[in-house]
Amino acid sequence: MPTDLRERILADFAALRVPLTADQFDVILARAQHEGLSHQYFLHLLIAEQAACRRERSIAHRIKEARFRHVRLLTDFDWEFNKQAIDRVQIEELATASFIGRRENLVFVGQSGVGKSFLIEALGRSACVLGHTVRYITSADLLTDLTASLADQTLPQRVHYFGRFDLLIVDEFGFDKIERTASPEAANLLYKIIDARNQRRSTALVTNIDFAAWNQYFSDFSLAMALLDRIVDKAILLKIKGRSYRAHRSHPPHTQPKTNH
């Protein structure tokens, strides 16, 4: 290959911001010449490694932006412990993130300790790998964030921020009294986020409050029903009635199972 053409190709890759070095190019070119590779396969070798690296960087960026609390993977989940309560096939289908493409909501309901948070973080991580933007946050932290935005008059910007993710995960809804005591506007603030995302993006809610008790959790019955209506609309509902992993760990058997949270 003429030197000037080689330099032009490298310059073109640089202009496209593809980090192909001269040494990498020469190695691939020598292999193509030696093995008599087709033009298409030569091109594939030039870009495949660079594309793979860029994909990995994008995945890492989305996972970092999601702000998960733990590294949760479905491969690490103990499917046997609550085998009758958790449908593995359904969870693995959710891991394809097709519900996000359909803009459906996802609601996990169940007592503490049955693995809801583990599963939702694992599903969120799978969505990141598949190219979706995700934000994980607890209900208490979300309301603390929104309450602070009232003070500095940035609420519209925060609503826009939480509204832009393909999947917003609100964990531990109903877990802590701070959700109700942090601000008299707590219910209204949560409603603003859910309403902004309604039918536009997918929202996942993890709670130990059954739907019948929502009007007791919020003092405003009409607001509770409006919030519930927008969450349940086009939602996949999973009610987990199983044993608590935490209680099991406090009285461990001879063979300790995997840990789910």
Image (cartoon, rainbow, N blue to C red):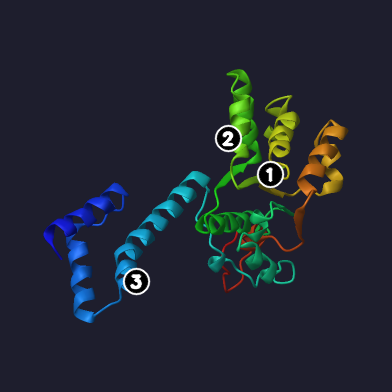
Identified at 87% across, 33% down, the residue is 222
Label 3, label 1: how far apart the Cα atoms are? 40 Å
Q: Nearer the viewer, mark 3 or mark 1?
A: 3
Q: Provide the residue designation for mark 1.
A: 200
| Residue 28 horizontal side relative to residue 113, left or right | left
Q: Nearer the viewer, residue 234 or 126?
A: 234
Identified at 48% across, 49% down, the residue is 62
Q: Callout 3: helix, strand or loop?
A: helix
Q: Callout 2: helix, strand or loop?
A: helix
Name which quarter of the figure residue 75 lies in.
Answer: bottom right
Q: Provide the residue designation for mark 3.
A: 40
Q: Callout 1: helix, strand or loop?
A: loop
Characterize the local packing of mark 3: few (<14), some (14-19) or many (20 or more) Cα atoms within 10 angstroms: few
Q: Give x and y (percent) for residue 228.
A: 81, 43
Precedes in sequence: disc 2 or disc 3: 3
Q: Nearer the viewer, residue 196 or 173?
A: 196
Q: Provide the residue designation for mark 2.
A: 161
Q: Say if 75 sits above or below 4 in the image.
A: below
Name which quarter of the figure residue 161 lies in.
Answer: top right
Instruction: Specify the amino acid type for callout 2.
Output: Tyr
